[in-house]
Image: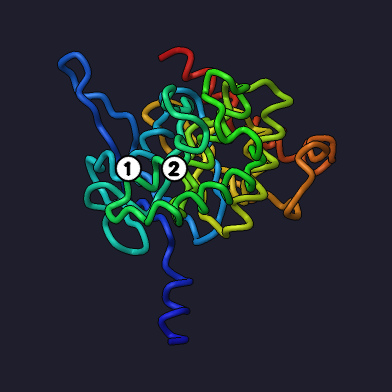
């Protein structure tokens, strides 16, 4: 058993080996992502930053099994991903809440869609626990149109987490929120993912978000995307998301990441 545990610990949760992706666009082949190598360990939080169109979302889609690599290999727990990866939860910029369902039933829909739906009473208990965990107690019967932007994001996050995925894929989930609400959501996300020891692959354009949340930050080049740099975040966790940006360590890392990124952002605007 110890040997198996050691082997599992050594196997990356997510691994891209020479993985690239091309697309057809207006009758011509466009390379979105050059061959890249990237490994993400179990319970590690990795942020992807880079200019628009550099392949960040493509990486998430390949890990989710929504796209296959044109070349190379994408693996999960050491096994090639073939078809939909049901071990991951995927949260995008849009919350995609169902307007005719209230908070509780929007969260519970994830349990209804499982291959083996759980008994109704057990599902109701699980939904109630998740509502409390994300701070929405008292809003169970409110509809999406009655919620603030931050509350809607909490519902979307709860819906993603309720079926307990091992890994969370997040594509700029808080981009539409104002600065204050975003900090609240970052604090909540940090708490929930570390509580559950989740592996997270997080796409953002905000270097501050990346430093606040991630154990490592991957800087992508302009299209066709490649990995330009990978930086460890040497800041003790958990941190105070409301004060971390004022520390010298935070400012120093932000400057170093921007030095890597600024030329790529300029290239990206020329595409």
Q: Which residue is located at x 32 percent, y 50 percent?
A: 114
Local secondary structure at mark 1: helix
Badge 2 density bin: few <14, some 14–19, many ≥20, Cα 10 Å: many
Mark 2 lies on residue: 108
Check whether the beta carbons of the residues at disc 2 and disc 1 lie within 8 A of each other: no
Towards the viewer: 138 or 88: 138
Task: Tell me residue 86's x, y (percent).
Answer: 33, 51
Q: Which residue is mark 1?
A: 62
Q: In the rendered image, which quarter contains the C terminus?
A: top left
Label 1 crowd bin: few (<14), some (14–19), many (20+), radius 10 Å: many
Nearest to viewer (mark 2 / mark 1): 2
| Residue at 19%, 13% in the rendered image | 26
Determine the image quadrant of residue 252. top right
Left or right, 171 with reference to 72: right
Q: Position of residue 165 (x, y in %)?
A: 44, 53
Which residue is at the front of the view, 114 or 89?
114
């Amino acid at each position: 058993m110890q040997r198996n545990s050691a082997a599992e610990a050594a196997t990356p949760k997510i691994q891209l080996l020479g993985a690239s992706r091309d697309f057809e666009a207006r009758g011509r082949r466009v390379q979105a992502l050059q061959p890249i190598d990237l490994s993400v360990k179990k319970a590690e939080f990795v942020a992807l930053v880079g200019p628009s169109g550099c392949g960040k979302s493509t990486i998430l889609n390949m890990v989710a099994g929504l796209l296959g690599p044109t070349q190379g290999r994408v693996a999960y727990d050491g096994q090639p991903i073939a078809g939909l990866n049901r071990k991951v939860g995927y949260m995008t910029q849009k919350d995609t809440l169902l307007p005719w369902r209230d908070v509780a039933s929007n969260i519970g829909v994830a349990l209804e869609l499982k291959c083996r739906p759980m008994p109704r009473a057990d599902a109701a208990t699980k939904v109630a626990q998740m509502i409390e965990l994300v701070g929405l107690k008292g809003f169970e019967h409110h509809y999406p149109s009655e919620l603030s932007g931050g509350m809607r994001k909490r519902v979307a996050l709860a819906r993603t987490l309720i079926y307990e995925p091992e890994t969370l894929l997040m594509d700029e989930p808080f981009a539409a929120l104002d600065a204050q609400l975003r900090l609240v959501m970052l604090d909540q996300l940090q708490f929930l993912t570390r509580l559950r020891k989740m592996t997270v692959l997080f796409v953002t354009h905000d270097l501050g978000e990346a430093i606040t949340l991630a154990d490592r930050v991957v800087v992508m080049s302009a299209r066709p995307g490649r990995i330009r740099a990978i930086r460890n975040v040497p800041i003790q966790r958990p941190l105070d998301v409301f004060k971390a940006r004022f520390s010298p360590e935070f400012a120093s890392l932000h400057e170093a990441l921007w030095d890597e990124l600024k030329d790529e952002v300029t290239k990206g605007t020329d595409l």
